Amino acid sequence: MSATAREKQLRGWSLVGPGLLWTIAFFLVPLFIMAAYSLFQRVGGRIVTDLSLANYRLFFEKPHHHDALFNSLEVAVVTAAVSMFLAYPLAYILAYRVPPRWQRIALVAAILPFWTSYVVRSYSWLLVLSSEGIVSKALQWTGLCDGPVAIANTRAATIIGFVHFFTMLLTLTIFANLVQIPASYRRAAADLGASAFQTFWRVTLPLSIPGVMVGAFLTLVLTLGDYITPQILGGYRELLLPQAIMLQIQRNADFPMASAMSMILMVVISAVFVIFSRWLKIERL
Amino acid sequence: MTARPLLASVLRRVPAAAYVLAAFAFILLPVAVLVLFSLQDSLLPIPPFRGPTFKWYAEVFEDVRVMAALANSLMVAAASSALACLLGFLAACGLARYSLAAGGAIRWLLAAPLSVSYLIIGMGLLVTFQAMAIPKSLGAIVIGHVVINLPLAFAVIYSQMGEHQSNIERAARDLGANERQVLLLVTLPMLWPAVLAAFFLSFTLSWDEFIIALLVSRFDVTLPVEIWSLLRSGLNPKTNAVGSVVFLVSVAIVAVVEVVIFSRRKSE
C-alpha cells in the first residue's frame, strides 16, 4: 500500500471511528456481557459466576416461564394478521380511491395517534376499554350487555392496543408500496380483459407483497419486544415475555435469569429476521 | 350526467367511504377520548362527560415532578440527537469518501442496533452498568439513546451523499482547503437538510423512548417514565392532561418539520 493510500485509509477510519467505537462500547460489548450474565446464577442474593446453562434449562422446564414466550408469539401473530386485514383495504382506498390532493391529509389523519407518546396511547385504550369506559357504557346503553364489561386486563385488550398501532404502521408501508405500482399495469390488465377482482388478485396484490411483508416483519418484531402495551392493557394474569423479563429484574433482581430470557427473546427476533430477510432489502442501507 | 350513473357511482363509493370512516374512528378514538376527558370536571375520566374545565392542565403545569421530567426529556432528546447526528455525519463521510477496507462490515455494525429490541439494548446497558458499578442517571439514558439513534442518523445522512458532492469537495481541495475545512465549510452545508432530518427523527424517537429510560434511570427521569409512574394512580384526568400536552407538542413539532421540509422541497 502506498503512503497516500494508507493515509487515506487512516483518515477514513478516523471519521468512522467515533461512531464505531460508540456502537461497540455501548451496544456490542453490553450484549456480550449480557450473554455472559445469562450463564451465571443468582443464589441467595449473590451472583455466582460459574458458567452453566441452568437458567435456560429452568426457562424451558418451568411452564410459567416458557408460557410467556408462547403467549408472546401468539399475540404477535394474531396482531400481525388482524392489522394486515384492517390496514390493507384502508391503504388501498387511500392510494387508489382518494383524490391525490386529499391523499396527503388523509394519510396524516390515518396516523395521527403515532404522535402521542407510546405510554399515553396505551393509557388512552385503558380509558376506552375499562369497565367504566365508553365501550362498556355503550354496550350497556344499547342493551347488548347487562353489566359493566371489562376488556381491560385481558389478552384481548393487549391485542386491541397492538392492532391499533400496527394498523397505522401497516397502512403506511402498504400505501407506500401501492402508490409505486404504475397505474398502467392495472390499465393493461383491464384492457386484456381482467375483471376488477382479477386485476387486484393477479396484478396489484402480488406487486404489493413487499410492503405487506415489511409491515408484517416490523409488527412481529416490535410486538415481541414490547413491554408497555401488555403491561398497561393486559395486566398480570397472563404475562408476555418482555413482562416476564421485567418481573425478574424488578421483583427478584435476578439479572442472570433476566439476561437468559433476553437472549431467548433476541434469538426469537433474529429467527423472524431470517424468515423475512428475502423481503427486507438490507443491502440497500 | 344523468341520474342513474350518478347514483350508481355514488353507491359504488359508499362501501369504501364507510370503511375509511370506520377505520378513522377506530384510529382516532383513543386520542379523542384522551383529549375529551382531560377536560373532565370530576375526579374520574370516564363517561358521562362533565365540563369542560382546564383545572387539570393547571395542575400539570404546577406539578414540579412532571415539569422536571419534561425538562429532562428535552435535554436528553437534544443531547442524544446532536451526538447521534455528529457521529453519524462523521461515519457517513468516512464511508462515502474513503473506500475503506472493511466498509461493508462497518456499515453492518453501525446498523446492527436497528435489529435488536429496545428492551434488549436497555437490558444490556443495565447489566453492564451494574457489573461496572456505574450509577443510573440521565447520562446513562443519553448513552442508550445515542445507541438507538446513531443507526438512523447514519442511514439518513449516508443515503444523501452522492457523486456530485464529492466533485464539489474535490474542487474545494484543489482551491487549497484542508480536510477539516472541506468537512465543515463544504460537506456539512451541502448535507444540512439530511442532518436536520436526522436530528428531528432522532429527537422524536428519544422524546418518546420509554424502556431504556426506565431501566437505566433512577431519581431523575424522563417524561414517559414519569407518566408511567402517574399510571399507578389508575385512571385520572390529570394523566389525560399530561398525555394531551405531549400529543399537542408532538403534533406541533411534526407540523413545523412538515412546513420547513415541504416549503424547502417546493422552493427547489
Image: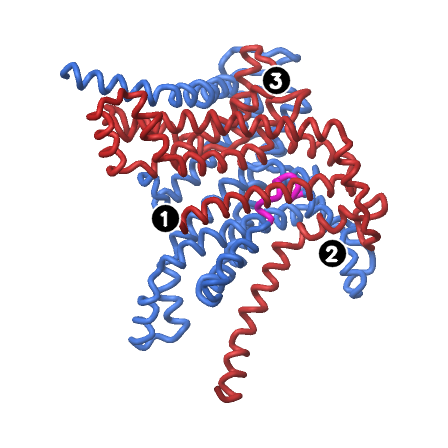
Chain colours: A blue, B red
Question: What quarter of the picture does the C terminus of chain A occupy?
Answer: top left
Residues at marks 3 and 2, CA–CA distance in whole angstroms: 41 Å
Residue with the mark numbered 1: B268
Which mark's residue is nearer the viewer, 1 or 3?
1
Residue A135's label in the rendered image is: 2
Chain label for disc 2: A
Q: Circle 1 — which element?
A: loop
Tell me if A89 is positioned left or right of A161 in this view: left
Q: Residue A254 at what x, y percent from top left?
A: 62, 20
Which mark's residue is nearer the viewer, 1 or 2?
1
The rendered magenta stretch, by its main secondary structure, is classed as: helix
Q: Quadrant of residue B75?
A: top right
Q: Is residue B52 visible?
A: yes
Local packing at callout 1 (Cα closer than 10 Å; few below 14, some 14-19, many 20+) is few
The range drawn in magenta is A113-122
**Which residue is nearer to you in this view: B9 or B115?**
B9
Q: Residue B84 at what x, y percent from top left?
A: 45, 27
Identified by mark 1, the residue type is Glu
Q: Circle 3 — which element?
A: loop
Local packing at callout 2 (Cα closer than 10 Å; few below 14, some 14-19, many 20+) is some
Tell me if A225 is positioned left or right of B35 in this view: left
Chain label for disc 1: B
Identified by mark 2, the residue type is Val
Residue B83's label in the rendered image is: none
For residue A121: magenta? yes
Q: Residue B98 at what x, y percent from top left?
A: 25, 26
Residue with the mark numbered 3: B136
**Which residue is nearer to you in this view: B192 or A257?**
B192
Identified by mark 3, the residue type is Lys
Q: Residue at x 55, y 49 (%)?
A: A79
Which mark's residue is nearer the viewer, 3 or 2?
3
